[in-house]
Image: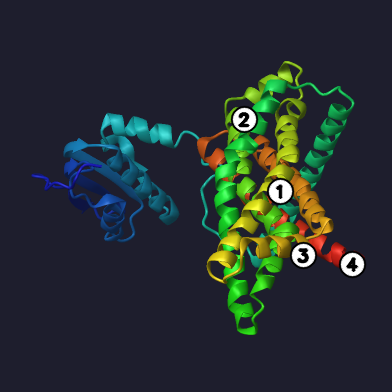
């Protein structure tokens, strides 16, 4: 909209009544968007000054210029008149304005078409959330079933996908993820060792920092942090890739050509994460223990040999195996959530961003939930 300007000939309104219940609304000046106009409220106010009006005519011989704001104001005035029982004679309006008004009033407004700002009640919103959650849960279970069938077809050699896509996904989920996994794992090891050192140093038990770091990394932190990193890095990428394909209707093209998107698109990504997550978790264990060794050797006065021997004695194969098993499930979660949100994405650019965000949030939440389930089960089994 152009900045407001002072009109040399502002709008003039004059209501001339004949005393018989009819009146003529005289409109003059420039009725344009940039000029200071009274709008529909000014018209309604001018009409309201007349008492016991039954009909109104228009005299626009002095109206030098007008635009769509004039038509909008007249329509509002007509609506007000209908509510008040006033009849309008449109013959005095400009011919172009009459045509626009006839076009606007040719079809009655559809019931419920007007946007309303009514806020639903608490129970309505709660019920809607429950229904939406149930729908999302069923969609996730259905997608998991289809992914399991595709994985079974792969195991018997009947899945159809390009091997080069699998190798590209393995490279993206494996080698290219090493820098960020290295950085986070070393920092986690440093933090665990530093916190443990503060608590153990007063008792002269600095050597047990190695136990704390190695067991925590092997059983919990390596798998969880790797899963969260891959959820934010790879899960979001999967959702964005498939969401973009959905926008471009490429997934529909796959179905039209007879290719199952579950096998051709989802299966390579799921296989890549199933293969790479255990390896990344083992690598994260090593880097986390290395980060703990930096604190143990550099701050606590331990020798590298002491730290290594204490780590080897405290960490068992069960601890390492538990973390690796978790990582496989976390990899499946990241792949399933990323691909699910990507395929369910809407057909707009904003929908792709929403799908990526939703995939990351859903994957992280499910990783934490599954880790809690693992903790309960291992405690019951005494592992």
Q: In this view, does 181 lie to the left or right of 124?
A: left
Q: Is any part of residue 201 visible from this angle?
A: yes
**Which quadrant is home to the C terminus?**
bottom right
Mark nearer the viewer, 1 or 4: 1
Single out the residue that lies furthest toward the left. 8
Q: Where is residue 169 in the image (x, y as percent from the top left)?
A: 66, 31
| Residue on which the image places disc 3 | 314
Q: What is the C-alpha distance between the residues marked 4 and 2?
A: 47 Å
Query: Which label is found at residue 382?
Result: 4
Q: Earlier in the sequence, mark 3 or mark 4?
A: 3
Q: Which of 343 and 206 is in front in this view?
A: 206
Query: Which label is found at residue 92?
Result: none
Q: What is the C-alpha distance between the residues marked 3 and 4?
A: 17 Å
Single out the residue that lies furthest toward the bottom. 202
Q: Earlier in the sequence, mark 4 or mark 2?
A: 2
| Residue on which the image places disc 2 | 246
Q: Which of marks 1 and 4 is nearer the N terminus?
A: 1
């Amino acid at each position: 909209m152009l900045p407001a300007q002072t009109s040399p000939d502002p709008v003039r309104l004059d209501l001339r009544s004949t005393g018989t219940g009819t009146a003529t609304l005289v409109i003059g000046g420039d009725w344009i968007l940039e000029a200071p106009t009274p709008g529909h409220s000014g018209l309604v106010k001018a009409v309201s000054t007349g008492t016991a009006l039954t009909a109104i005519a228009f005299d626009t011989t002095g109206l030098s210029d007008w635009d769509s704001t004039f038509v909008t104001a007249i329509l509002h005035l007509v609506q007000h008149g209908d509510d008040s029982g006033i009849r309008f004679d449109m013959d005095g309006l400009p011919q172009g304005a009459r045509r626009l008004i006839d076009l606007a009033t040719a079809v009655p407004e559809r019931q419920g078409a007007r946007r309303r700002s009514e806020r639903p009640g608490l129970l309505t919103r709660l019920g809607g959330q429950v229904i939406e959650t149930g729908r999302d849960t069923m969609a996730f279970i259905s997608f998991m079933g289809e992914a399991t069938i595709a994985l079974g077809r792969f195991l018997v050699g009947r899945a159809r996908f390009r091997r080069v896509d699998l190798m590209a996904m393995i490279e993206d989920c494996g080698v290219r993820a090493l820098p960020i996994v290295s950085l986070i794992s070393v920092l986690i090891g440093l933090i665990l060792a530093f916190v443990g050192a503060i608590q153990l140093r007063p008792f002269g038990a600095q050597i047990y920092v190695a136990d704390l770091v190695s067991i925590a990394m092997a059983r919990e932190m390596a798998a969880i942090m790797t899963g969260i990193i891959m959820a934010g890095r790879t899960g979001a990428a999967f959702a964005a890739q498939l969401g973009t394909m959905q926008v471009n209707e490429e997934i529909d093209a796959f179905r039209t050509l007879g290719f199952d998107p579950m096998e051709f698109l989802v299966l390579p990504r799921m296989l890549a994460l199933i293969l790479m997550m255990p390896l990344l978790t083992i690598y994260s264990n090593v880097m986390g223990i290395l980060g703990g060794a930096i604190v143990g050797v550099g701050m606590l006065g331990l020798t590298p040999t002491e730290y290594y021997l204490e780590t080897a004695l405290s960490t068992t194969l069960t601890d390492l195996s538990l973390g690796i098993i978790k990582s496989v499930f976390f990899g499946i979660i990241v792949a399933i959530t990323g691909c699910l949100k990507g395929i369910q994405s809407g057909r707009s650019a904003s929908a792709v961003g929403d799908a990526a965000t939703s995939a990351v949030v859903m994957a992280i939440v499910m990783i934490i939930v599954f880790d809690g389930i693992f903790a309960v089960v291992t405690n019951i089994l005494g592992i």
